[in-house]
Amino acid sequence: MINCPKCSSEALVETPALGNIPLDVCPGCSGIWFDKGELEALLKQSPAGGSADFNLINPKAGSLACPRCKNKMSRGGLVNPLLLVDKCEACGGVWLDANELGLAKKLLGVSGGSSEVKVERPAAAPVEPPARDPKIVLIKTAAGVGALLGLAGVSFEMYLYFSPAASVPRAPSAGIAVASALLFAGGILVLNWGKEDRWS
């Protein structure tokens, strides 16, 4: 996958929209990237195109980087000095802006076929959540069980404390109540720790 030389954040989408030539098109600006020989093959569909010289006229150093090999492309006339395009002298690829293909076809008298290609951005691949570490799952499970046991212990000690002495099996224990409260608080703390991405 290669990126558009003008819209650096856009990935070019391959499409056979212009016959059997798989072209790379930008879904943002609709510019087209032709690998070496592809533009020539398309424009040679007419007698005028067959005899045309596809070397750049008055090439000068351009500002765009080749999407294929990352070298700076040259900018010059294609077929006509007024039709300025970008061409990579290293790999031979040519970049045409959205309206430049139509101009090239008109200059060569090529009729038929589309002169503008539009593509949709490919759907983003669903992001799968990271796999959970079995140790973390075990620790969190133990923390949850501990929190429940602590809550049960605190609740039972409060029941013993507020109930008449004659109706309960034993007197409430401050030590058990404190231990149960600590167990409950510790379990809740461990369970909430993962929400800060410390368990990811």
Image (spheres, helix red, strand yellow):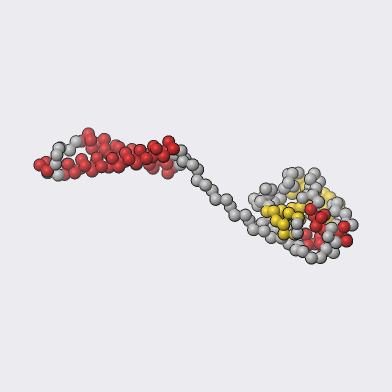
Q: Quadrant of residue 84?
A: bottom right
Q: Residue at x 73, y 44 (%)?
A: 70
Q: Is residue 152 left or right of residue 68?
A: left
Q: Residue at x 76, y 62 (%)?
A: 115
Seen in the picture, residue 181 relative to 58 is either above or below; the reply is above
Which residue extends farthest top? 175
Which residue extends farthest bottom? 112
Residue 180 lies, in percent from the top left, at 26, 38
Residue 2 in view here: yes
Residue 54 lies, in percent from the top left, at 85, 53
Q: Is residue 174 left or right of residue 183?
A: left
Q: Nearer the viewer, residue 174 or 200?
A: 200
Q: Quadrant of residue 175?
A: top left
Seen in the picture, residue 43 relative to 168 is either above or below; the reply is below
Which residue extends farthest left? 166
Residue 198 in view here: no
Q: Nearer the viewer, residue 85 or 20?
A: 20
Residue 199 lies, in percent from the top left, at 44, 39
Which residue extends farthest right? 51
Q: Residue at x 35, y 38 (%)?
A: 142
Q: Residue at x 26, y 35 (%)?
A: 179
Residue 49 lies, in percent from the top left, at 86, 59
